[in-house]
Image (spheres, rainbow, N blue to C red):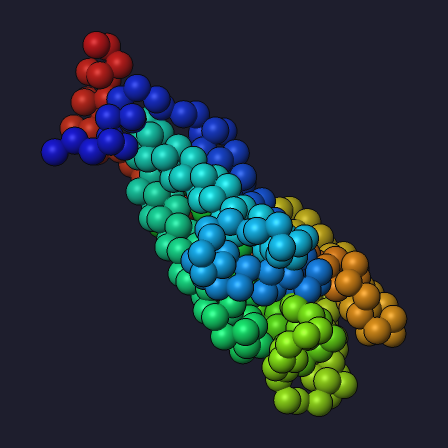
């Protein structure tokens, strides 16, 4: 039985470069949606639309009475469709490639379902009046989307054969530990935000937005401790990769991670001592997504994946189609 995607594949067979660009576009949009979500919070527009999935009980779109906050929140919701379009392009490009990349289409569909689930979580944040725990889950799910989008982009540059490690197993484990610690760093960062200065909506004329009841300074100190641990692990990887002459890509990526992580740490320091101004917090959220993506790229540079051998019957069929 023919599907719409298989019919499209008969007429459109994108190049490898097109597949990679499409996957990269999906990755960029996954980072953009983190930044725009932060803009909603930092402009106190989290309840700009008072309900979900509509913007109000009677209107799908914001009304003039809702002002700029309604426009900002609704715009962020509409950007979800742009994100879905980027994911759809990447998934279809992988499906229509001359040799169907099933591993990539699965990652594309995983991104789609992550977006759908996060849209529901976003709706719950509105319906619960910006409950900080739900907001934290919303951010974690967005970082999960960045993870899958980055994996699809990196896999688009590899074959579908079995992965082969390029360094010893202890170094692979150390890089995985580094990723886990940075993941924990991001997770604790969402808790800091939930107890911090920007609840996401103004309390003027209404009930104040609930905050996580944990001492803010203690949370910040825990977050800072994880920053120092992360930097230490990355520095250790820089020297370890240089000592064993790890692949050039791995050495370059871990150096890039160190630069991004140090810049993010400096942003966090300035943010704390300037009482968390909105612009600094927004840059810090963008930095969190970039640090997470940079960390995920390091273990992926420690392996190689060749193309799977083409079965004889499939190769014959391909030549027949080309001849026709």
**Residue 169 percent across, percent down from the top left:** 50, 65
Q: Hey, which quadrant is residue 48 in on the image?
A: bottom right
Query: Measuring 51% from the left and 49% from the top, which residue is drawn there?
Result: 61
**Residue 263 percent across, percent down from the top left:** 79, 60
**Front-most of residues 141 and 212:** 212
Left or right: 276, with 61 as reference point? right
Left or right: 206, with 89 as reference point? right
Tell me how many marks there are: 0
**Residue 203 percent across, percent down from the top left:** 68, 75
Q: Hey, which quadrant is residue 227 in on the image?
A: bottom right
The answer to whether residue 116 is seen in the rendering is: yes
The single residue placed furthest to the left in the displayed view is 1
Q: Where the C terminus falls, by quadrant?
A: top left
Q: Where the N terminus falls, by quadrant?
A: top left
Query: Measuring 66% from the left and 89% from the top, which residue is drawn there?
Result: 214
**Front-most of residues 55 and 166:** 55
**Residue 33 percent across, percent down from the top left:** 57, 52
Q: Hey, which quadrant is residue 102 in on the image?
A: top left
Query: Measuring 68% from the left and 64% from the top, which residue is drawn there?
Result: 44
Left or right: 26, with 204 as reference point? left
Query: Measuring 53% from the left and 64% from the top, which residue is drawn there?
Result: 50
The answer to whether residue 164 is seen in the rendering is: no
From the viewer's perspective, is residue 114 above or below residue 81?
below
**Front-most of residues 49 and 192:** 49
């Amino acid at each position: 039985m023919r599907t719409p995607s298989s019919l499209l594949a008969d007429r459109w067979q994108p190049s490898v470069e097109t597949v990679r660009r499409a996957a990269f576009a999906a990755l960029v949009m996954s980072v953009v949606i983190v930044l725009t979500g932060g803009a909603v919070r930092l402009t106190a527009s989290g309840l700009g639309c008072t309900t979900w999935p509509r913007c109000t009980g009677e209107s799908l779109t914001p009304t003039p009475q809702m002002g700029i906050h309604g426009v900002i929140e609704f715009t962020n919701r509409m950007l979800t469709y742009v994100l879905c379009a980027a994911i759809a392009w990447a998934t279809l490009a992988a499906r229509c490639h001359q040799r169907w990349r099933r591993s990539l289409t699965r990652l594309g569909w995983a991104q789609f379902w992550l977006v759908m689930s996060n849209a529901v979580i976003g709706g719950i944040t509105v319906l619960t009046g910006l409950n900080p725990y739900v907001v934290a889950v919303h951010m974690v799910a967005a970082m999960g989307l960045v993870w899958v989008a980055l994996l699809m982009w990196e896999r688009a540059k590899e074959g579908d054969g079995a992965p082969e490690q390029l360094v010893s197993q202890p170094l692979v484990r150390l890089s995985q530990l580094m990723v886990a610690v940075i993941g924990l760093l991001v997770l604790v960062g969402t808790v800091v935000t939930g107890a911090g200065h920007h609840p996401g909506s103004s309390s003027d004329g209404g009930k104040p937005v609930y905050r996580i009841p944990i001492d803010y300074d203690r949370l910040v100190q825990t977050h800072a401790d994880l920053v120092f641990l992360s930097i230490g692990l990355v520095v250790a990887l820089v020297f370890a990769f240089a000592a064993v002459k790890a692949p050039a890509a791995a050495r370059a990526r871990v150096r890039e991670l160190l630069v991004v992580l140090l810049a993010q740490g400096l942003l966090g320091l300035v943010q704390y001592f300037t009482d968390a101004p909105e612009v600094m917090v927004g840059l810090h959220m963008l930095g969190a997504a970039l640090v997470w993506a940079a960390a995920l790229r390091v273990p992926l540079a420690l392996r190689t994946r060749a193309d799977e051998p083409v079965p004889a019957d499939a190769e014959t069929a391909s030549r027949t189609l080309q001849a026709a």
